[in-house]
Amino acid sequence: QVRFVESGGGLVQPGGSLRLSCATSGLDFSGSTIGWSRQAPGKEREFVAFINRYRYTEYANFVNGRFTISRDNAKNTVYLQMNSLKPEDTAVYYCNIYVGRLPVSSWGQGTQVTVSS
């Protein structure tokens, strides 16, 4: 069974940084494209970023160079370094397996990111 455990969220001031982690199990991690989506209150879940097996990455337009996705195949973990955070980045962040920009597995519990002064 595929499992995702997201962590690292919290409350941060505008302009601050957070590093999210997603520990995975039950999948061929090193061969998979893994990424992040987020869901803000009252909004649809939206794609944020993915990294494939060759460490090729893609980001949503709103990231605009502020986030960096990375992976550690030895730990079956993917990370999302988020800098220059804005209030509009407030959301629950989730990781998943991706085909293109589409998530294809069930969701974990996510991690809450709140950007507020």
Image (cartoon, grey):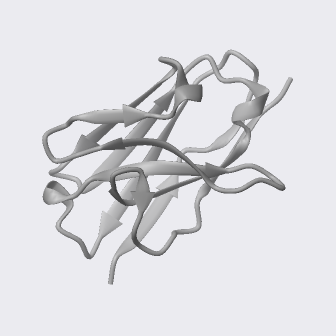
On the image, the x and y values in percent for residue 54 come to 13, 40
Q: Residue at x 14, y 58 (%)?
A: 31
Q: Is residue 80 above or below residue 24?
A: above
* 24 and 43: which is toward the camera: 43
Q: Is residue 114 above or below residue 111?
A: above
On the image, the x and y values in percent for residue 112 come to 68, 50
Q: Is residue 107 above or below residue 11?
A: below
On the image, the x and y values in percent for residue 35 come to 39, 49
Q: Is residue 100 left or right of residue 32?
A: right
Q: Residue at x 70, y 56 (%)?
A: 44
Q: Is residue 30 left or right of residue 16?
A: left
Q: Is residue 69 visible?
A: no
Find residue 13 and report its image quarter. Answer: top right
Q: Is residue 86 visible?
A: yes
Q: Residue at x 52, y 52 (%)?
A: 7
Quick one: quadrant of the N terminus? bottom left
Quick one: quadrant of the C terminus? top right
* Total marks placed: 0
* 83 and 75: which is toward the camera: 83
Q: Residue at x 76, y 32 (%)?
A: 88
On the image, the x and y values in percent for residue 39 come to 68, 53
Which residue, as the protein is rendered here, is positioned at the far bottom?
Answer: 1
* 30 and 8: which is toward the camera: 30
Q: Is residue 83 left or right of residue 90?
A: left
